[in-house]
Image (spheres, helix red, strand yellow):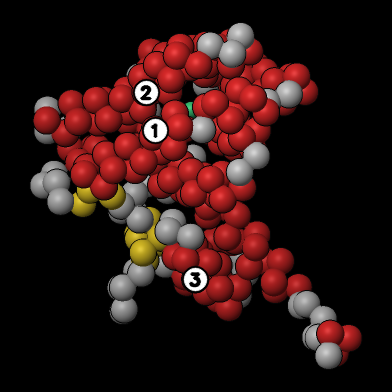
Amino acid sequence: MRSQLPRLQSRVSITDEVFETLRSMIIQGKLRPGEKITESGVAVEMGVSITPVREAFLKLEAAGFIASKPRQPSQVSMLSLEELEQYVFIRSTLEQASLDRLLERITASDLDALWAIATRMRQSLEQRDWDSYAKDHRSLHELLLQSVQWPILQQIVMRIFDSLDRYRFLGNARSLDQWTEDQCGHEELLRTIERKDKEAAIRLVVESHDRLVIHLKRALECGDHDIAVHFTGVRP
Ligand SMILES: [Zn+2]
């Protein structure tokens, strides 16, 4: 009977807190692909017991953020270059194909909210505040997808976003020019959406995804050790 369900214990929210903290750190590139992470280490550092951390690890693994092997420390999930290219292809294809729907459904208040986020991103960029930038960047794409009003599409693309964005962070980490180029691309995308210019919007979507792949490929071809260690199947 529903009335007999047990009351939730506080460790449930600690699990969520641990999950959210680690998830943000992975998305923001503070925990990088391939980095090892142990339940006991997290429990000690965060000052919590092992049980909620274990539960948070299970949730992180189910959501694709970490990978676990028996009797080994978990690792932040890594991609091969080919997997990264597949994700980019799928995300880019879905974003282009849903643009018609986005342009039909997006409202003036959606656009106001998007510009507010883009303005904060510009400020974070100027202040080199990468944590805020990464957080707002995710919100911007989530809101754009929300405007399409297809929740399953939103879920699928956001999952891909989370697998990819840590690599964008990695790839751009050393070049302010690339961050600025990304930011200008987002602002230009909002302008094209505002004037319902589908062709220009498609071009910007394709360009932004291409930029990530080209940059990382070039780094790997040049034998950039700092980037290679974050890929599977690449000998650093
Ligand atoms: Zn973006």
CB of mark 2 within 8 Å of CB of mark 3?
A: no
Element carrying mark 2? helix
Q: CA distance from mark 2 to mark 1?
A: 6 Å
- Dot 3 or dot 1: first in sequence order is 3
CB of mark 2 within 8 Å of CB of mark 1?
A: yes
Residue 176 visible to an observer of this rendering = no
Residue 8 visible to an observer of this rendering = yes
- Describe residue 206's horizontal placement relative to residue 127 as left or right: left
Residue type of the residue flagged with mark 2: Val
Q: Write the residue at 38% across / 13% down.
A: 177
> For residue 131, what is the image quadrant?
top right
- Check the picture and name the quadrant holding the N terminus: bottom right
Tell me the tag on residue 92: 1
Element carrying mark 3? helix
Residue 6 lies, with reference to residue 198, above or below; the image says below
- Dot 2 or dot 1: first in sequence order is 1
Residue under label 2, please give it. 206
Tell me the tag on residue 193: none
Q: Nearer the viewer, residue 157 or 200?
A: 200
Residue type of the residue flagged with mark 3: Leu
Residue type of the residue flagged with mark 1: Ser
- Check the picture and name the quadrant holding the C terminus: top left
Residue 7 lies, with reference to residue 222, above or below; the image says below
- Describe residue 226's horizontal placement relative to residue 115 as left or right: left
- In percent of width and height, residue 158 lies at 51, 44
- In percent of width and height, residue 114 lies at 66, 23
Residue 203 lies, with reference to residue 134, above or below; the image says above
> Label 1: how many residues lie within 10 Å, few (<14), some (14-19) or many (20+)?
some
Q: CA distance from mark 2 to mark 3?
A: 34 Å
Residue under label 3, please give it. 58
- In percent of width and height, residue 11 lies at 70, 73
